[in-house]
Amino acid sequence: MTLQIRLFATLKEHANASHISLDMPLPSSVAQLRQTIATHYPQLAPALPSALVAINKAFASDQTLIQPGDEIAIFPPVSGGADLPHPTYFAISADPPNLNAIHQHLLRPDIGAIVSFTGSVRGQTQREGLPPQTLYLEYEAYNEMAEAKMAQIAHEIWERWPTVKGIAIVQRIGRLDIGDITTFVACASGHRDQGVFDAARYGIDRLKEIVPVWKKEVGPNKSAWVEGHYHPTETDN
């Protein structure tokens, strides 16, 4: 059967394509998928051992079986939804977020505190392998899965901090210049001592772990994709 496999970030760049096609008998395991890709697309082979595989927008292990009709995506480690009991705002957007409008969306008569984190593009990066000076960043996302993972983060927050009510998570994509907002996470509750500070911190940390978004640092003389170190597993679904 012919599989259509979506590629993101470094893998898309190595293949010079956003999709690859592969003929495989099904069902086959994710481990077999990796081996077959390495054989037919050798330019992707160096990135495959650390790459993550998603099946139907959920993280898959090497033992996961691929069935006919499955949606498959492969991407490097990352540096939405229904049944939400409180006000939420999730967005993957090329446009700057309207922070005042998001706050107004989270406000309710029983809300007395909103704590937020705002990330922005900085001009200097002191990390090995990256340009020492950043001209701009390029962000890319697996949008459909990213929105689902944002909703998952909200549910995780409510499990840990039941007094937190409204939650907003925003990730920018596209070209972002120095000073532009990259990420925004906000948590609302009745009082400031009801977990909103810890919940907002958890939200941004978890976004960096499981939401499939990648960035490229572009400097005067070089550019590089920034890959994370956390490898989600099926337990992160």
Image (tube, rainbow, N blue to C red):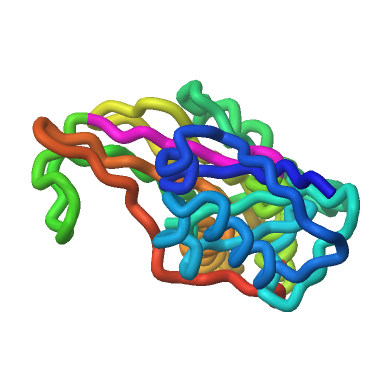
How far across and how far down the image is residue 176, in percent? 34, 28
**As drawn, is 220 to the left or to the right of 13?**
left
Identity of the residue furthest to the top in this view: 95
Task: Please name whichever residue, 233 or 89, is drawn nearer the observer in this view of the structure.
Answer: 233
Query: Relative to residue 135, is residue 131 depicted above or below?
Result: below
Q: How many marks?
A: 0
Is 137 part of what is drawn in magenta?
A: yes
Task: Please name whichever residue, 153 or 33, is drawn nearer the observer in this view of the structure.
Answer: 33
Query: Relative to residue 203, is residue 216 depicted above or below?
Result: above
**As drawn, is 34 to the left or to the right of 221?**
right
How far across and how far down the image is residue 129, in percent? 17, 56
**Residue depicted at 70% across the width and 40% down the height:** 144
Which quarter of the rendered picture does the C terminus lie within? bottom right
The segment highlighted magenta reads 136-144
**Residue depicted at 86% across the width and 61% down the height:** 26
Query: Relative to residue 172, is residue 129 depicted above or below?
Result: below
Query: Relative to residue 231, is residue 215 depicted above or below?
Result: above
